[in-house]
Amino acid sequence: MKPIIFDVDTGIDDAMAMAYALNSPELEVLGFTTCFGNVPVVESTRNTLAVLEKLNRRIPVFEGAGQTLVRGKKKKYPKHVHGEDGLGNTLQFEPTIKASKGNASDFIIEQVKSRPHEITVIAVGPLTNIAMAIKKAPKIMSLVKEVVIMGGAVNVQGNVTPYAEANIVSDPEAADHVFSSGLPITLVGLDVTLQTYLLKSKLDEWRATGKESARFLAEMTDYYMKAYEISHPGLGGCALHDPLAVGVAIDSSFVSAEMMNIKVVTEGEETGRTIGQQVSGPGIRVCTKVQADRFVKHFLERVI
Ligand code: BDR
Ligand code: CA
């Protein structure tokens, strides 16, 4: 089993990715760390706890960054995509389980220190917690086994602006810091996630299982798909951004990649853009192709 720290900004596709990871025997999720992103951090923590409660799992959750590295608080949250509550307005309860004491970046550092070269970090929100961990303990970070990041749009258009993807543009300086840190990164960006689709018909199959957790995921994903009907008319479903990062952590053969240096634009109208330059030596593994059908089948076999 791969020991995992899962950094989330929960979020509807984060919730699907959580269920997929927790139902995958290859992964041992040691803890979730939360960040602002789809919602403010307090709500991202609450949503993470709520999803765990619905899935009937007890895994430590550590709250992290409430704001960007240098730009202060995020100004606008994507309620049209993830709902008022971040879970498609399905959250009708306050989770009874509580977050653990301690901070997200400290938890990452502690775990990496105690298990050198073993820990994989999956990060599916803004990269603020990871950047803070690097800043606090640069030497310890060289002991991370792998970081699988959902973020960026290297050879394709962005989803927030024509240039920028949501996780990167939410904290461009943090992303740039992480990408230039030398960490062993696999970047799962829109280049590949926008080729992975969950069709609306699957939600009825989830509901038909009669499982409470499946119904919960189906209801929130229904909301998410309505946002896709506007942004991607005719698609009949949604992309599986955060779940693909989990898929790649389980089985890297779902994707093929090119080695690149990645620079993040931090000024002007292209802010948040991820500019890739191919390298022959060490760099970031940027996923450029995905075996979408094989991945989606794997996801569907496990998510509910
Ligand atoms: C990413 O942005 C967030 O809205 C999603 O949860 C995903 O992590 C997609 O661009
Ligand atoms: Ca996310």
Image (tube, rainbow, N blue to C red):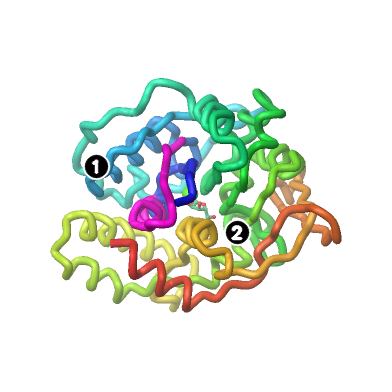
CA distance for labels 1 and 2 = 28 Å
The stretch of residues the image draws in magenta is 15-33
Vertical order, 47 against 26 (above or below): above
Residue neighbourhood size for the residue with mark 1, other residues' Cα within 10 Å, grouped as few (<14), some (14–19), many (≥20)? some
The image quarter in which residue 192 lies:
bottom right
What amino acid is labelled 2 in the image?
Answer: Val
Tell me the SS state at disc 2: strand
Viewer-proximal residue among 27 and 5: 27
**Left-right relation of 114 to 152:** left
The answer to whether residue 73 is seen in the rendering is no
Tell me the SS state at disc 1: helix
Q: Mark 1 points at which residue?
A: 53
Q: Name the residue under label 2.
A: 188
Viewer-proximal residue among 102 and 269: 102
Residue neighbourhood size for the residue with mark 2, other residues' Cα within 10 Å, grouped as few (<14), some (14–19), many (≥20)? many
The answer to whether residue 282 is seen in the rendering is yes
Q: Residue at x 49, y 41 (%)?
A: 5
Q: Which residue is drawn at 60% across and 53% down?
A: 151
What amino acid is labelled 1 in the image?
Answer: Glu
Q: Position of residue 260 (x, y in %)?
A: 78, 57
Q: Which residue is drawn at 77% across and 55% down?
A: 275
Magenta span contains residue 67: no
Q: Position of residue 28 (x, y in %)?
A: 41, 47
Mark 1 and mark 2 lie on one chain; the one further toward the N terminus is 1
Q: Which residue is drawn at 52% across and 45% down?
A: 125
Q: In which quarter of the image is the C terminus?
A: bottom left
Magenta span contains residue 17: yes
Viewer-proximal residue among 120 and 285: 120
